[in-house]
Image (cartoon, rainbow, N blue to C red):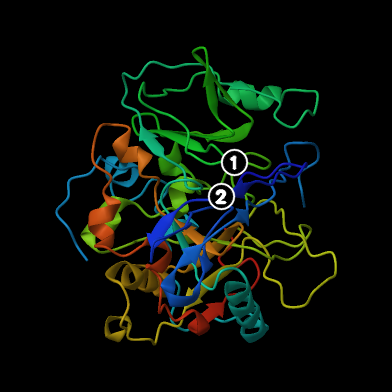
Amino acid sequence: MLKFASQRQSLIAASCVSLSVLLSACGGGGSSSADQAGGIQAAVVQSASQDTAAAGAPAATTTSTSVARSATDAAGSTVFSPNSFWYQPIPADAALHSNSANMVADFLRQKQAYYGNVMVNTNSYSSPVYVADANTPTVAVKMWDCQGKGYVDQALEAQWASVPVPAFAKPSGGTDGEMTVYQPSTGGIWEFWQTKNENGQWQACWGGQMKNAAASNGLFDNPYGTTATGLPFIGGQVTAEELQKGEINHVVGIALVELEKSSIFSWPATRSDGYNPDNAPNRIPEGTRMRLDPSINVDALNIHPIAKMVAKAAQKYGFVVWDKAGAISIRLQNAQSYTDKGQADPYPALFNGTADYALLDGFPWEKLQILPMDYGKQ
């Protein structure tokens, strides 16, 4: 998630009951679950450290469940320009990174080392997206100095001077407190990290604003935006509406644990919080594009329907490494996007009894392919 120059760590515990043992399985763009014997999941994990350029120089089964209108639906088929990298299919014959095989091996090493699975975040460590209409009153969001830097970024406060925050909005759970506001009528997108509302005053420690999203390339200007790479949540999160329709038509954001050092990153990332002090080989840089081998017959795989949707999107559009986390993870749009409007959480019906940590079980991660540095740069 959001990356600041000082480091933040927290221990997260969430619970699931199995064999009368209370254990945990917690989503996190900084936390995840540990794979235990007999399918029991337990997690007492660290959230990713948050190192952002803001602290100084920038660091180099289908269901008919009705859900709230999502940002994608509000805007039509896309939020950003149709020419944005978020929506560009990868040709089947696209060239691969010369070190693809070794980098995939490192991905698999990390997956095994950090809880043995790839997490799907739906609550903490994914961002709620609140869609504001043209009549939503605006408020000024202030920057609070959560890191004790001793100054406030005036340019950021200017971006937050007039934000149409719906009355029911609130930040996500977990230590990151992310929140996104999207107003289709103006094309404005506002992101917030470490968000809070004290005595009626909205505050956040970092984030950013995009104007006229429909004409945007889908990237925040450096050093703004909440993820480590400056890539917006609204671009790479998967919505409940997409899962209901059975199709994901965009690049999917993915967070890794051990990444190449921050000075090495790939477009579309505008920065990185990677850390590789020992120069371990084959580390994947933030911003890296990767895809699932397009020759795989996904429909023949014995995996959850949601995993099939993710796999097909990964074949057509690929993943982008957009963040650092305590376990490899992707984000679904936070369930608060729906429940805060008084609607039911759509995910239990979509998951059909499968735990979030098991949704991607059986996914053929060994068939990933790494694309070259700066793939698709615009």
Residue furthest front in the image: 20
The image quarter containing residue 255 is bottom right
Q: Nearer the viewer, residue 58 or 257?
A: 257
Label 2: few (<14), some (14–19) or many (≥20) C-alpha neighbours in 10 Å? many
Q: Residue at x 72, y 58 (%)?
A: 274
Q: Position of residue 290 (x, y in %)?
A: 54, 72
Q: Residue at x 42, y 24 (%)?
A: 165
Q: Compared with residue 78, is residue 208 higher up or lower down, i.e. above or below?
A: above
The image quarter containing residue 294 is bottom left
Q: What numbered label is drawn on residue 231?
A: 2
Q: Nearer the viewer, residue 190 or 83?
A: 190
Label 1: few (<14), some (14–19) or many (≥20) C-alpha neighbours in 10 Å? many
Q: Position of residue 287 (x, y in %)?
A: 62, 61
**Secondary element type, mark 2:** loop
| First reached walking from the N terminus: tag 1 or tag 2 | 1
- Kind of residue indicated by mark 1: Gly
Q: Position of residue 138 (x, y in %)?
A: 43, 17
Q: Quadrant of the C terminus?
A: bottom right
**Secondary element type, mark 1:** loop
In this image, 256 relative to 258: left or right? left
In this image, 330 relative to 324: left or right? left
The image quarter containing residue 106 is bottom right
Q: Nearer the viewer, residue 304 or 217?
A: 304
Question: Answer yes or no: do the residues labelled 1 and 2 have beta carbons within 8 Å?
Answer: yes
Q: What numbered label is drawn on residue 126?
A: none
Alpha-carbon span between mark 1 and mark 2? 7 Å
Q: What numbered label is drawn on residue 225?
A: 1
